[in-house]
Amino acid sequence: MIKLSDAEWKIVTCLWDKGSMTIAELTKFFSNDTGWCRNSIITLLNRMEQKEAVDYTRENRTRRYFAKIDRTEAELEETTSFLNKVYSGNVGLMITNLIKSEKLSKEEIEELHKILEEN
């Protein structure tokens, strides 16, 4: 299981959504939102390469980065990790807390009912 920091999640999500990107493109994309400079992006990408979460192809001297991990698998692993860490694996407790805190809309609650009825 690959553990990603919040910053690494931002980058891999961007790569999933946008496809492959260069360091310059990533820096431009994140500069306003996060204030990350080129060196910050490079540091994060190097860490993610070591974790085998991203890889790159070369275009002359430019590296074009892409997500190496599958989005669905990564999201499922992260969800399972969160569920175990915060709720000791108790899905019912998590859903109850979401409903009580009014974090779920009426449509989302109806969608949950539908999912539960189908399974």
Image (cartoon, rainbow, N blue to C red):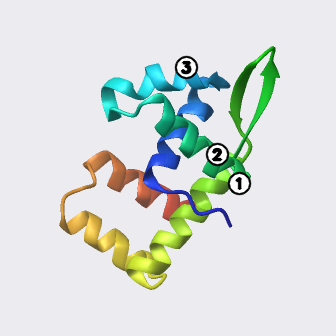
* Residue contact between numbered discs 3 and 1, judged by CB atoms under 8 Å: no
**Which residue ends up furthest to the bottom in the rendered image?**
88
| Residue type beneath disc 3 | Ala
The quarter of the image holding the C terminus is bottom right
* Image-based side of 86 in relation to 48, left or right: left
* Residue contact between numbered discs 2 and 1, judged by CB atoms under 8 Å: yes
Q: Earlier in the sequence, mark 3 or mark 1?
A: 3
**Which residue ends up furthest to the left in the rendered image?**
101
Q: Whole-percent x and y of residue 44? A: 55, 45
Which residue position holds label 3? 24
Would residue 119 be seen by someone viewing this image from the given angle?
no
Which residue position holds label 1? 50
Q: CA distance from mark 3 to mark 2?
A: 15 Å
Which residue position holds label 2? 46
Closer-to-camera residue (39/27): 39
Q: Earlier in the sequence, mark 3 or mark 2?
A: 3
Q: Residues within 10 Å of mark 3 (few under 14, many from 20)?
A: some
Q: Residues within 10 Å of mark 2 (few under 14, many from 20)?
A: some
| Residue type beneath disc 1 | Gln
Q: Whole-percent x and y of residue 79? A: 52, 64
Measuring 63% from the left and 22% from the top, which residue is drawn there? 22
Residue 12 to residue 4: above or below? above
